[in-house]
C-alpha cells in the first residue's frame, strides 16, 4: 500500500500469492524489501509475488493450484528454500541451486522445468490458505493476494537474493517482529502486520508449543483461512496523521488496524501499526 493517488477507474487487481513459513521454533520467515521495490518498499513481508504464466502447469490447472505454485516459486526465488514432496537429490548442490534460483528469477529457466529435470514435485499439498487480501480501489497498484501458511524444518537456511528483491531473509518469532515494529526497526504494511499479530495470538500462552501449530492449522482450514480481507479507511485520527482501517465485510469484523500515514501525502511507508477492536474505534 505504497501509493494513495486515486485513479479515475480502479485498477484491476493482479493475482499474487505469498507464503508464511513457520519453523519448529514457531518463528516465521520474513524478507526485507529494498527501497527500490515497486511493492512494499523498505518493508518486511512474507515471500511472494505476482502470478506468472509458468505457474499454470496446464490450461486446466485450478486457480488455487496456480496460486500455490506461484507461492512456492517466489519463495525459492527470494529465499532459496525449495519445498518439494521429496528431498532434492545429491546432484542438486548449493551451487546448482543458486544458479537455478537466479535463472528462474531472470526468466531464462522456468520453475516447473527446473523441478522436472531433477524429478521433483512441488509440495502444494503442504500449503494451507490463510486469508486473501484485495488492495483498496484507491490504490494505483492493486493486488488480489492469496496468503498460504506451511510448516517447515530447519534443514534449509533462508538467504537473500543479493538485494534484487530481498535485502535479508530471516526467521523471527511474531512477538519479536512486532516489538521491532513498535520500536521503528521494522516496517509492516497492514496485511503483514495483521497476519504477524494474528499468528502471534495463535501461538501465545497455552498454544506456544505444538498446540499452537495445531491451532494455526485449524484456523487455516476453517473460516479464518477463507476470509477475504478488503482494507478500507473508517476513521482519520490526529488530523489525518493516522488512519483506522477496517478489514471489510468478508474479512475480520472484530478488529481494525491503526496505521500512520506518510507526512508528505505521497504514499510510502505506513508505520506505527496497531490493532484495535472495532467496538473501540469511536473511543480513539
Image: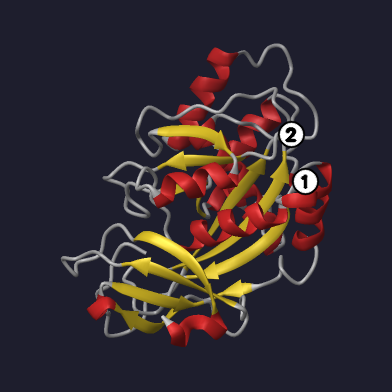
**Residue 235: image location, x then y, percent:** 38, 84
Instruction: Give the color scheme: rainbow, by chain, secondary structure or one colour.
Output: secondary structure
Camera-nearest label, 2 or 1: 2
Q: Name the residue under label 1.
A: 126
On residue 24, which mark appears?
2
- Quadrant occupied by the C terminus: bottom left
Q: Is residue 104 visible?
A: yes
Cα distance in 3D space between marks 2 and 1: 15 Å
Q: Nearer the viewer, residue 78 or 253?
A: 253
- Residue drawn at x 75%, y 45% is 208
- Residue drawn at x 71%, y 70% is 226
Is the C-beta separation of discs 2 and 1 under 8 Å?
no
Label 2, secondary structure: give it: loop
Label 1, secondary structure: give it: helix
Q: Residues within 10 Å of mark 2 (few under 14, many from 20)?
A: few
Left of 21 or right of it: where is 137?
left
89 w.r.t. 148: above or below: above
Between discs 2 and 1, the one toward the N terminus:
2
Q: Residue extending furthest left? A: 264
Q: How crowded is mark 1: few (under 14 residues within 10 Å), some or many (20 or more)?
A: some
**Residue 204: image location, x then y, percent:** 70, 51
- Residue drawn at x 65%, y 24% is 156
Left of 78 or right of it: where is 215?
right
Amino acid at each position: 500500500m505504497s501509493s494513495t493517488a486515486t485513479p479515475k477507474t480502479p485498477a484491476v487487481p493482479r493475482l499474487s500469492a505469498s507464503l508464511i513459513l513457520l519453523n519448529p521454533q514457531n518463528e516465521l520467515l520474513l524478507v526485507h524489501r529494498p527501497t527500490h521495490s515497486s511493492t512494499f518498499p523498505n518493508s518486511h513481508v512474507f515471500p511472494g509475488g505476482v502470478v506468472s504464466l509458468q505457474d499454470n502447469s496446464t490450461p486446466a490447472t485450478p486457480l488455487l493450484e496456480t496460486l500455490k505454485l506461484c507461492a512456492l516459486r517466489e519463495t525459492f526465488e527470494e529465499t532459496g528454500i525449495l519445498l518439494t514432496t521429496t528431498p532434492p537429490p545429491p546432484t542438486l548442490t548449493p551451487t546448482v541451486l543458486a544458479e537455478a534460483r537466479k535463472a528462474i528469477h531472470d526468466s531464462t529457466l522456468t520453475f516447473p522445468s527446473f523441478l522436472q529435470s531433477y524429478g521433483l514435485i512441488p509440495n502444494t499439498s503442504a500449503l494451507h490458505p490463510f486469508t486473501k487480501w484485495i488492495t483498496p480501489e484507491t490504490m494505483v497498484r492493486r493486488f488480489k493476494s492469496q496468503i498460504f501458511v506451511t510448516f517447515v524444518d530447519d534443514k534449509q537456511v533462508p538467504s537473500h537474493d543479493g538485494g534484487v528483491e530481498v535485502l535479508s531473509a530471516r526467521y523471527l518469532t511474531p512477538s519479536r517482529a512486532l516489538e521491532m515494529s513498535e520500536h521503528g526497526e521494522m516496517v509492516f504494511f497492514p496485511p503483514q502486520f495483521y497476519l504477524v499479530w494474528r499468528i502471534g495470538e495463535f501461538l501465545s500462552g497455552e498454544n506456544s508449543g505444538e498446540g499452537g501449530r495445531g491451532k494455526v492449522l485449524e484456523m487455516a482450514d476453517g473460516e479464518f483461512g477463507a476470509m477475504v480481507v478488503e482494507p478500507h479507511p473508517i476513521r482519520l485520527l490526529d488530523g489525518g496523521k493516522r488512519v483506522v482501517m477496517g478489514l471489510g465485510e468478508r474479512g475480520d469484523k472484530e478488529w481494525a488496524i491503526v496505521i500512520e500515514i506518510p507526512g508528505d501525502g505521497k504514499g510510502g511507508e505506513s508505520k506505527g501499526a496497531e490493532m484495535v477492536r472495532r467496538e473501540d474505534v469511536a473511543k480513539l
